[in-house]
Amino acid sequence: MAAIVLDGEALATSIKQELKVRIDALVAAGHRPGLGTLLVGDDGPSTSYVAMKHRDAGALGMASTDVHLPADATQDQVLEVVARFNADPAIHAYLLQYPFPKHLDFEAAMLAVDPAKDVDGLHPVNLGRLVQGVDAPVACTPAGIQRLLVAHDVPIGGAHVVIVGRGLTIGRPLANLLSLKREHANAAVTVLHTGVPRERMVELCYQADILVAAAGSPGLITADMVKPGAAVVAAGVTFAGKKVVSDVADDVAAVAGWLSPRLGGVGPMTRAMLLVNCVNAAERRAVAP
């Protein structure tokens, strides 16, 4: 039986329709949501990704501000933009597009971001709130994966979730999110990485009810690693020229119960959850004293 497609494109469209109602209400009350981005340098995928974020925001009637610094920008120039975004009441949430050029300190810039305006949910304060189970902006890709699973009736509570990849943007926050004692979570979570011997990785992945590939290693997850009927989320990708290559091999489709596609799966959900975080921030600001 063919795997059920975890259709992120369709779900993201539905989320945007819901957001449009909220955005229209904010605009009518004089609080147009504003998204900011800071891009340093000319990394091709980053440039495309930032453009898509602004296109998404504009289509929903949000305001957006893009600052693009040259690749040789100084740390002081970066921090000046961060300070400007923090102080600008028209920007409700913003992001620092990763990666930065190697001579810049991304972590120091991230620490300077106002946590309330952290649209990516990656500020240490917000990551700490996630660990505590306290309301805060949640990292976009983990939040998108959770929504994708819930929308397709994949059971999470009590399930064994295996995440291959321990990165800051997906693996670590997703593990915390899905293990929280709350609805649409409460899972037993195992986090693996490419330092785990292959035979051990195969063994542990095969135990998963939900398997999330987020290592950025092309074709890492193969059919022999997937328990028949398991949900498989292809979150990790790499670029081979202009082609997007998934962590999940094509043969997985023959055994998985649910499977996110290489394109139109996790990517659209990540962008949709970024918009959700921005609108949430605008709503919080609108009711603040």
Image (cartoon, rainbow, N blue to C red):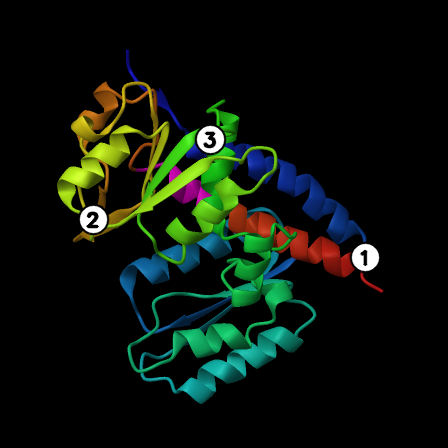
Q: Is residue 40 above or below residue 142?
A: below
Q: Quadrant of residue 9?
A: top left
Quadrant of the frame with the N terminus: top left
48 is within the stretch colored magenta = no
Q: Amino acid at mark 1?
A: Val
264 is within the stretch colored magenta = yes
Q: Is residue 225 left or right of residue 174?
A: left
Query: Exactly how many numbered labels are in the figure?
Result: 3
Q: Residue furthest right?
A: 289
**What kind of element bears circle 3?**
helix
Tell which tag, 2 or 1, sits nearer the viewer.
2
User: Which residue sits at x=66%, y=57%?
Assistant: 281
* Residue 99 placement (x, y as % from top left): 34, 67
Q: Which residues are magenta?
A: 263-272
**What kind of element bears circle 2?**
loop
Q: Is residue 275 left or right of residue 199?
A: right
**What kind of element bears circle 1?**
helix
Badge 1 density bin: few <14, some 14–19, many ≥20, Cα 10 Å = few
Earlier along the polypeptide chain: callout 2 or callout 1?
Answer: 2
Residue 149 is labelled as 3
Q: Amino acid at mark 3?
A: Leu
Q: Main secondary structure of the magenta part?
A: helix
Q: Quadrant of residue 169?
A: bottom left
Asked if residue 261 can be seen in this view, the reply is yes
Which residue is identified by label 2?
A: 196
* Residue 120 placement (x, y as % from top left): 50, 58
> Which one is in front, 51 or 92?
92
Q: Is residue 224 above or below residue 127?
A: above
Tell which tag, 1 or 3, sits nearer the viewer.
3
User: Which residue sits at x=32%, y=84%?
Assistant: 72
